[in-house]
Image (cartoon, rainbow, N blue to C red):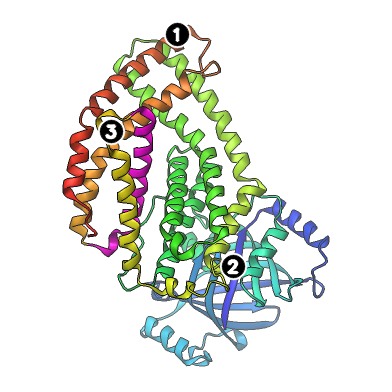
Amino acid sequence: MTEIELKFVLNEDSIRRLKNRLKGLELNESAARTRTLRSVYYDTPEHSLRKAGTALRMRRDGRRWIQTVKARASINGGLLRAQEVENPAPGGRLDLTKIPVLAVRAEVEEAIAGAELAPVCETQMKRVTSVLMLENGARIELAIDSGEIIAGELREPFHEAELELLEGDVDSLYDLTQTLFPDGGLHLSTMSKSERGYMLAATGRAQTEPLPRNACTVPLGAEMTSEIAARDVLRECFEQISANIEVVLFTDAPEGPHQLRIGLRRLRAAFGMFKPVIGHPELMRLNEEAKLVGAQVGALRDLDVVITDIIDPEHEAHPHEQGFNALRSAIEARREAVREELREYLRSERAQSFQIDLARFIETRRWLTPEDFEQTARLAQPIRALSCKALGKRWKSCVKHARGIDHLTIDERHELRKELKKLRYTIEFLGPLYSAKKVARFVKTMKKMQNIFGDLNDLAMAEELLCQNDSPGARNANAQRAVGWVLGARSVKAEAAWAHARGLWRDVTVTGPFWR
């Protein structure tokens, strides 16, 4: 059978709040059941099963032993899908010949290739399960696990909730998630317990540290349908956003807000790119929510940039100017206040709803519109056909905004910068459909142009942050002297760079659109 579930990492406080919330909802189909589960995961010395995307488990549930194979597992948007095959295992003895689905048995035997199996890790969990009935008739099992993940002598406590779909559609899982966790602060689990056990055995930790996540290339193929391409691109955007939300919440790493803002911008660029295919009111609403989150993140990112990319280099160039210390201290204080405001927002109900609704939009094909009879044809068209139109549209907008480039105002330069960035993201998404050499040559030329706009943007952003009545250090004479150094140096650099803008834009146009 295909197992479909949403998983969430909890702690003791969130478990208590979840149980209290559950009592007031009156969704239980039957009384909650508590039992102790011991699950042992087996593999070859080379971990061949894991490499094949398969988990082989022996579980003791009360007095019963059950052998389970989970194959072809995938996690997207927090949603786990896997083919699960079980059979009784008297005495807790592995017996691959008892796997009831022949195709799954063949996959396991092929992966093992005759190698010896041995325990890699195990989990010991106290599980409380409830079967919940929703108003739409969907039946969902809620399992709350509290216990340990074990690998040899290593042990790590772990708490998790699982919502497994028994009857109904996947959409119901997201409905129930919003009902059970209405106050925000939810953490989707992106790893199975077996993966955590393997990691504990290899690294001594069962949970990954929050690390900044850069964008990854989506392997699009020319014959892929536009709908599948849209789904895969949006999944990549979701993963980048979700991972970097965790980084911002639990670390002070400047790369966290940087990559989160990039992820949100890429999402909005993807929405624009695929709007002709998956255009839907929900897409527009999510786009506005992404814009709102991006503004919140941008406030922190701008302060990081002012400190590390603007003030610190100038201080290094003028080490005897004491005003830089006062200015940096004032901006650091502002940055910490903005960081806490952002964290509070990311834990809020609204930010959580954005994440859950974005995952729902992607994983349940929320863009389908029954009354749109032409939608099926648009969804089925090859992505290559859509890509030329999407790239051409972005290119046309850049050409329009670059007219009279020598005489653009500051605002017009800023608009051109935004259009170039949208084109860049679109190229990153669709680049795999074209010649790698042509794409690389075009992007290399365009990057030089974007660097100029980066200098201009840094200057404008520094002026906005440092020249207001309530700016950090506004009442400190030494700090204001440092502001003068910073803005003077940045103005000279920006204007010197802009002198080359016309030539660089000519290079971009000469290199030419690679998609034609």
- Looking at the picture, which amino acid does disc 2 mark? Thr
Q: Magenta residues?
A: 409-434
Q: Residues within 10 Å of mark 3 (few under 14, many from 20)?
A: many
- What residue is pinned by disc 1? 478
User: Where's residue 369, x and y in %?
Assistant: 56, 70
Identify the element where label 1 is drawn.
helix
The relative height of residue 513 versus residue 141 in the rendered view (above or below) is above
Q: Mark on residue 123?
A: 2
- What residue is pinned by disc 3? 452
Mark 1 near mark 3, Cβ–Cβ under 8 Å? no
Q: Nearer the viewer, mark 2 or mark 1?
A: 1
Identify the element where label 2 is drawn.
strand
Q: Which residue is drawn at 21% across and 34% down?
A: 502
The relative height of residue 484 versus residue 504 in the rendered view (above or below) is above
Query: Which sits earlier in the primary sequence, circle 1 or circle 3?
Result: 3
Pick the residue in front: 475 or 59. 475
Identify the element where label 3 is drawn.
helix
222 sits to left or right of 281: left
Dominant secondary structure, magenta: helix
Q: Nearer the viewer, mark 3 or mark 2?
A: 3
The relative height of residue 410 versus residue 385 in the rendered view (above or below) is above
Question: CA gap, disc 1 to disc 3?
Answer: 30 Å
Q: Quadrant of residue 277?
A: bottom left
Pick the residue in front: 174 or 72. 174
Instruction: Residue 152: tell me if it is visible.
Output: no
Task: Give the position of the C terminus as an image quadrant.
Answer: bottom left
Q: Does the magenta stretch include residue 429?
A: yes
